[in-house]
Image (spheres, rainbow, N blue to C red):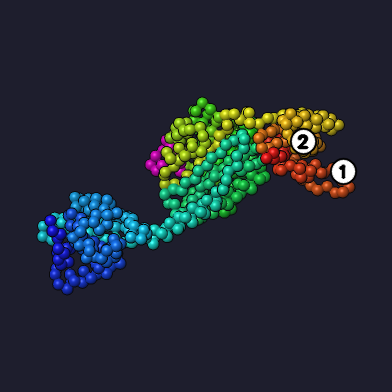
Amino acid sequence: MPAPRLTAVEDLVGVPAGRDAALLSVLLDAAPVGFAHYDRDARYLHINTALAAANGAPPEAHLGRTVREMAPALADVVEPLIAKVLQSGEPVLAVEITGVDDRGHLSHWTTGWYPVPDPVTGACVGVAVVATDITTVVAEGEALRRMAMTLQRSLLPASLPTTEELEVAARYVAGAADTEVGGDWYDVIALGAGRLALVVGDVMGRGVPAAAVMGQLRTAARTCARLDLRPGEVLDVLDGVLRDLDEDAIATCIYAVFDPHTRDLRLASAGHPPPLVRRPDGRTVALEVEVGAPLGLADASRETTAQLQPGSTLALYTDGLVEVRGSDIDRGISALCEAIAAGPADLEELAEVVMSRLGEGDDDVALLLIRVPEDVDSRSRTVLVEVPRERALMFDVRSQARLAMRSWMLLDDVVDTATVVASELATNALVHGRGRVELRLRLTRDRLVLESVDSGQHMPRRRRAGDEDEGGRGLHLVAELADRWGFRATDEGKVVWAEIDLA
């Protein structure tokens, strides 16, 4: 069948012949937006310069030819749109189309498709399209998105510490509005002696203000971790920080500390979704946690203690993972429990499974998974030494500590150094502590941990002794010989610890 001949503009759009039609033709051809008119077989009856250039051919080369002939890469998108308009007689608006020019460059257009009625019968005899080039807008949006994601990543930890007693995996995914940074964050902080602090939080809102608040809360949490404050104390500090920053800001947060020696998980929650635990038998449940009000509302925090048995997995997350618009959050938590229960044992694989099933909502998502290995008991060895109150018997304490470390086949210089550190820790506890004193030695694959435990509440303070002072050099010596040292309060008193790297 011969191709239809392009006649006058009035035959295409139903305007009267003459000067008005000629003017309309000029306007269409000179317009900065693309315009085309197709017949019922998707053949070009008219196309202006802007849209023809996108197809890589002059307007006259299009006339009478089909979309598939002139723009084959777009035919599978354009032909169904033309068919839909012809069938319904209704316009189809705001359709974004991406094309590739002859140089391989991407172009992006937002299009509107309109029925063209016969001026006499009113029947739909063709389809017109108006297309606006948004390539620059899309490119700018991509640049903003990359900047936003770079900023977001800079506010999250570059790497996560792990220990022999605890495996960690984390994921963060921006929501639908990913040209803006968000207020979700997670963190894992090494506290020393194998203990880890685990943090997940969510500042309400989006954009730079929320990210700025989030960054300052994360910094404050890390400062509190350096002081080894309890979880409830940390949240109380963060609550005050948030109110100082912005009296109208609201955030939820959960802060937990895991101790590999006791396997205690001590945590506090400020309005945050409940942590989930997959037990060794695979059953996954929400931990019963005393939840305080969100940060910013001046509510005193409450603490909860639970135990993580070998083979257990803990999940901390933000509400974007379980909260779907129009659905109950309890249903989302149940779905997360099912995903974790049915997921693989490997933590990284489990994180991928959870995110693929539940992490595709409109909100940001932060996920932190923690697992106690099933063979954790074989990954460390511990010796407890009772320290008598008589300082004259410290020789026996040093001998027991040295004997235990030699049985672990440690190098002589490591044993010598650790014996001095252990002796100073025990002596410091006897002099400045109270009640029963215990010395703990724990060996893992890459470190030796030495801890003195007593019931005194007075925290030690390192000071430099003068040349004529008889004492005051113990903690200074510990700090010089150990790779790390510190102290923390407990319900029964305090622990002073030191670590020696074996790597």
Q: Secondary structure at mark 1?
A: loop
Determine whether 24 is above or below 482 in the image.
below
Q: Does residue 194 appear anywhere in the picture?
A: yes
Query: Label 1: how many residues lie within 10 Å, few (<14), some (14-19) or many (20+)?
Result: few
**Residue 72: x %, y % from top left:** 27, 54
- Viewer-nearest of labels 1 and 2? 2
Image quadrant where residue 311 sits = top right
The residue that mark 1 highlights is 470
* Range of magenta residues: 320-334
Extreme-right residue of the structure: 468
Distance between the alpha carbons at the discs numbered 1 and 2: 29 Å
Which quadrant does the C terminus fall into? top right
Q: Name the foreground residue: 160 vs 379.
A: 379
In the rendered view, tell whether residue 269 sits above or below residue 240: above
Asked if residue 329 is among those painted magenta in the image, a careful observer would answer: yes
Residue 338 on image: x %, y %? 44, 32
Q: Which residue is mark 2?
A: 412
Left or right position of 82 against 335: left
Local crowd at mark 2 within 10 Å, few (<14), some, or many (≥20)? few
Does 271 sit left or right of 386 as displayed?
left
Q: Seen in the image, is 217 located left or right of residue 471?
A: left
Q: Position of residue 268 (x, y in %)?
A: 58, 39
Q: SS of the residue at dot 2?
A: helix
**Residue 170 within the segment the image draws in magenta:** no
Q: Quadrant of the N terminus?
A: bottom left
Residue 303 image point, x, y percent: 60, 37
**Identity of the residue drawn at 69% across and 40% down:** 501
Mark 2 residue type:
Asp
